[in-house]
Image (cartoon, grey):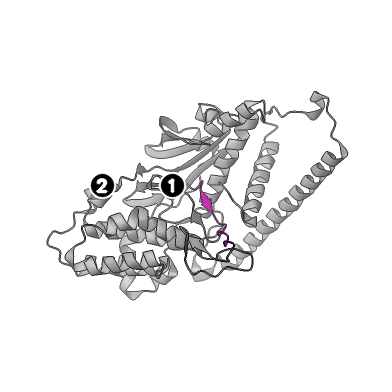
């Protein structure tokens, strides 16, 4: 994934530093096969030694920043924990995400928000699974294999989960071995493990009802193993079913509006996420899954918070069309990530779910929404508000000839 923005680089380095510190802390329990430069009879030259010292200084500085951030977080928690008489969890804890405040303040969206809470927000808040819990997961089958990770279905205490981990057989590791970059499998495995760890760190920060929830993480070594108890790194998330657009398009229109409402709220969240305005670079329905009757983003490998650059004419283009976004002084297009997400969501989800087999009462409204998304005259926040109002009307006042089926329909 091409990540250009500085804070993403900082996040990646801090994540890697954390992993290194963890490995050091566990050396007393387990000895790792780390290559020793002296074993190969090679002495670093002055330039290489200077680079090593520079990197060590950077690591020390980043560690200090991490400690400062942790102290600052503690201060914030101490100041906020008594607000409304309710204790707050640490910022790093897994808490239930909320809907955008703009929707909360809409009187006509109150009923809609209540419906949404029942189906997406009120999941149980629990502590993250650690290595001891993850050791007890029973692997049932392999669901898929990507460039850097293997996804398997597992079961813990009768609950199905998705288990993600790096493996020697994935493409990134095999390409690394074939290239001769590293001779040991463990060294190439670390590169793939880093990508899995990065995904876990992103999921820990991006919390929304329409993003799969990170439920477990275990780091213990730099080894790959088919046995979950011996794997160096394991990430556990919610398990979903593949999105079947043909099945979703056959749902009652009221259900399709509800699904699109959740996606519009997701697009708004990504536009103003804790990581900045985040774009889904590889926007396909295969990147999403169905969980609890909601469409959820499951693969965050291709997220980027770097806004696209302006062209040589200082224009911001979307699909080679000037979208009238002003080019910033840093030659970036602020807001283009959000515009691109919404347009891609229109192509993949909104058009097939909202634009076909529309009840006569809503044809004009649906056509208006489709045109405004195409022209860029509506943003994700406005779209979520309009779909919320529409869904509330359909639930409370609309009298269709064919009533929608119960929630357990699919």
Q: Secondary structure at mark 1?
A: loop
Q: Is residue 309 covered in magenta?
A: yes
Counting the numbered discs, the total is 2
**Crowding near the residue tagged with mark 1, few <14, some 14–19, many ≥20 C-alpha atoms within 10 Å:** many
Residue tagged 1: 298
Question: Viewed as shown, does residue 385 lie left or right of 97?
Answer: left
For this orientation, the residue located farthest to the front is 313
Residue tagged 2: 247
Instruction: Tell me if residue 222 can be seen.
Output: no
- Vertical placement of residue 35 versus 346, above or below: above
Magenta region, mostly helix, strand or loop? loop
Picture coordinates of residue 373, whole percent (x, y): 37, 65
**Between 333 and 167, the one nearer to me in the picture:** 333
What are the residue bounds of the magenta stretch? 301-312
Picture coordinates of residue 345, whole percent (x, y): 39, 56
Q: Is residue 29 covered in magenta?
A: no
Give the CA separation, mark 2 to mark 1.
19 Å
């Amino acid at each position: 994934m091409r990540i250009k923005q500085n804070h993403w680089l900082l996040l990646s380095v801090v994540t890697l530093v954390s992993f290194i510190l963890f490995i050091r802390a566990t050396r007393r329990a387990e000895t790792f096969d780390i290559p020793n430069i002296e074993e190969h009879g090679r002495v670093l030259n002055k330039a290489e030694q200077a680079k090593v010292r520079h990197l060590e200084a950077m690591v020390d500085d980043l560690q200090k920043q991490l400690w400062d951030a942790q102290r600052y977080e503690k201060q914030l928690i101490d100041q906020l924990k008594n607000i409304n008489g309710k204790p707050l969890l640490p910022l790093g804890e897994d808490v239930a995400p909320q809907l955008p405040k703009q929707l909360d303040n809409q009187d006509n969206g109150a009923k809609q928000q209540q419906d949404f809470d029942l189906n997406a927000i009120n999941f149980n808040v629990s502590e993250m699974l650690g290595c001891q819990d993850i050791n007890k997961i029973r692997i049932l089958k392999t669901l898929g294999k990507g460039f850097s990770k293997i996804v398997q279905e597992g079961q813990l205490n009768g609950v199905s989960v998705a288990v993600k981990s790096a493996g020697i057989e994935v493409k990134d590791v095999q390409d690394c071995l074939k290239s001769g970059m590293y001779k040991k499998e463990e060294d190439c495995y670390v590169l793939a493990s880093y990508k899995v760890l990065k995904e876990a760190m992103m999921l820990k920060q991006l919390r929304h009802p329409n993003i799969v929830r990170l439920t477990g993480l275990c780091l213990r070594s730099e080894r790959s193993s088919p046995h979950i108890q011996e794997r160096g790194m394991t990430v556990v998330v919610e398990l979903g079913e593949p999105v079947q657009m043909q099945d979703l398009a056959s749902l009652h229109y009221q259900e399709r509006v509800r699904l699109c409402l959740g996606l519009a709220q997701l697009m708004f969240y990504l536009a103003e996420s804790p990581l900045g305005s985040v774009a889904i670079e590889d926007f396909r329905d295969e990147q999403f899954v169905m969980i609890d009757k909601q469409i959820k983003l499951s693969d965050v490998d291709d997220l980027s918070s770097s806004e696209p650059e302006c062209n040589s004419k200082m224009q911001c283009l979307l699909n080679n069309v000037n979208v009238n976004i002003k080019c910033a002084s840093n030659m970036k297009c602020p807001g283009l990530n959000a515009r691109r997400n919404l347009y891609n969501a229109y192509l993949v989800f909104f058009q097939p779910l909202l634009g076909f087999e529309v009840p006569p009462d809503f044809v004009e409204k649906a056509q208006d929404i489709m045109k405004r998304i195409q022209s860029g005259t509506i943003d994700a926040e406005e779209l979520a508000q309009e779909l919320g109002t529409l869904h509330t009307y359909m639930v409370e006042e609309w009298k269709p000839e064919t009533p929608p089926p119960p929630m357990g329909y699919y």
